[in-house]
Image (cartoon, coloured by chain):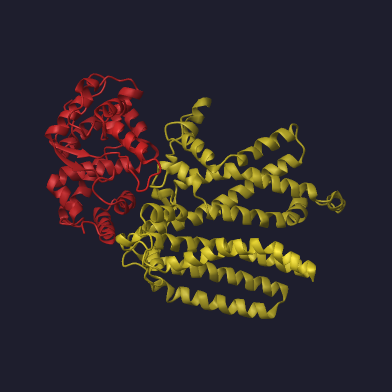
Chain colours: A yellow, B red
Amino acid sequence: MRDRITAFLVLLPSLVAVGIFVYGFIGQNLWVSFSDWGKNPTQALALRPELQFVGLENYRELFSGFVDVRFRQSVVNLIFFTLFFMAGTLGLGLLLAIALDRGPKGEGFFRTVFLFPMALSFVVTGTIWRWLLQPQGGVNVLPTLFGFPPFNFPWLTTRQQVLVFDWNQLPFYTALAVGLTLLYLAWQAHRGGERKRLFWSLLSSGLLLLWALTLGRNIRLLPYAEPHGFSLALVGVILAAVWQMSGYTMALYLAGLRGIPVEILEAAKVDGASEWQTYRYVIFPLLAPITLSALIVLGHIALKIFDLIFAMAGLDYAPTDVPAIYMYLLAFRGNQFAKGAAIGILLLLLVAMVVIPYLASQLRKEVRR
Amino acid sequence: MTPPKTWADFLATCQTLKRKGLEAPLALGENWTQQHLWESVALATLGADGWANLWNGKLKFTDPKAVAVWDTFGKVLDCANKDAAGLSWQQAVDRVVQGKAAFNIMGDWAAGYMSTTLKLKPGTDFAWAPSPGTSGVFMMLSDSFGLPKGAKNRQNAINWLKLVGSKEGQDTFNPLKGSIAARLDSDPAKYNAYGQSAMKDWQSNRIVGSLVHGAVAPESFMSQFGTVMEIFLQSKNPQAAANAAQAIANQVGLGR
């Protein structure tokens, strides 16, 4: 009993602090996002602003108000950035780890070299890469060293977009993506022989796809077509981010590779597995938990990215905009606190979507143990 | 080459230069320098009165006259370098200095950069003229120090303000930065040829405020004007930009 009281007393300060400074402020932020703080310029910077409750108005404006076209592009940018950044970092990190695991000469040296970019802050990385990616210099003149003509890609300065779609089609595409994911889950359940799960995922996926293909196509968020797509200016940003973080995934994978018991590999060899088969059926499955942890860490870095883009392209450049940048812009330069808070909540939800399933699965595992 | 007097002149000159092989006659930098260019086009297109009316709410951004500003601005952009977004204002000035461009629309500080940092001689190494169509109008901004309420060292703060505001203080700082004093009694001998010419204009011209440098509109409008600029640069649609500008103006209560 006394132990319990001591434990409670020791935990109390941090409970209170986390309660106020994390959950309290999340709550306050949520309230601000439902208010009109910033709509009335005389109230915006008042010491005790009088706030009106406006419900989801701020969210509606972000997704379908015509001034906030930049927010919508920033969401599209964020999705593409996150996808390519995670794929690039995981892929490059895995390749580097496999290369180093084979014990080349100077392994320790290369390991340090590859890991070193992670020691830099994103601001340093961003500034260096901004210089490297100047259209007239840096990376573009690299081929001339070997007698080739220089590259002509304008990197960060391009406004070109590919994979362009109309924002009005967003509900359709979202429903399509979620529906297909559910369909995949249903297939998994079918293979695992879980009938209840199969039924529910099949039902919800079917309903969603049906809705997407019939009513979903006709929903219009905006009275006009608004094209958004993957802006090519992001390629440079992704390059810099992958350069910085792939050393980190390399370190994770290297630790994972070193942790695989030699017996297993030898058993595979005895069974006559080729090199590729060893990787495909023995090593990669054993690395899966590491991939998951790396995905979580990289995912939340990508979703909250701010400093790298700030340093590379500045605040006022829509082609590389992400919600965090636009949030800062709205709240702290435009005094649109309510709208800024709404973006903050949306970002929180996005990160929660990545982190909570992971935490839940970890917890379940611990209980099972 | 004579500096163009109007934007129509400018566009004609630009075509000539392009034909002679100069790819981008106008040097331009990141977003705010584009806004700086926009306000120079707007001042020329709307005139000093129209410009003032934009800020007191009498002229709407969606007025055909104001939409026309974006039209001209778009044409002017065609004369500028395509990698503008990646350049700072200094790098844009550098393009002119290196002969890769003929013009750059910038404030006094560009003259300071060229004479103090690059050691060029005003009048011989570089020349200047009012932005097309704004002859006789001086677009102004000022950097200022404030005295906060309840300042801890009030007396020292006041002493500092007195020093920087004095003729001596102003005449020490401004020639280096390339700016001029708001005072009318500064000593022209301390300034270079550009500074002297700017001082003459300051006394004789009509004075209007700058948008991008925060002299005509509240911060809440100004900071979102960057977004309007991005909307235009992305869509190249004058009406879309004008609508967005007006929506923000309504929201922040411009002119009320």
* Above or below, A328 relative to A208: above
Count of all numbered marks drawn on residues in the image: 0
A185 and A128: which one is in front? A128
- Where is residue A197? Give x, y as percent: 66, 77
Residue B210 relative to residue A183: left or right: left
Q: Residue at point 34% right, 28% down?
A: B94
**Visible in this render: residue B201?**
yes
* Above or below, A44 relative to A252: below
- Where is residue A286? Give x, y as percent: 76, 55
Q: Residue at point 50% right, 60% down?
A: A347
A364 and A320: which one is in front? A364
Q: Residue at point 49% right, 70% down?
A: A175
The quarter of the displayed image where residue A42 is located: bottom left
- Where is residue A340? Give x, y as percent: 42, 59
A205 and A3: which one is in front? A3
* Above or below, A249 relative to B178: below
**Visible in this render: residue A165?**
no
A246 and A350: which one is in front? A350
Residue B235 relative to residue A249: left or right: left
Q: Which quarter of the rendering shows the N terminus of chain A?
A: bottom right
The quarter of the displayed image where residue A168 is located: bottom left
* Above or below, B222 relative to A180: above
Q: Which quarter of the rendering shows the C terminus of chain A?
A: bottom right
Residue B81 relative to residue A239: left or right: left
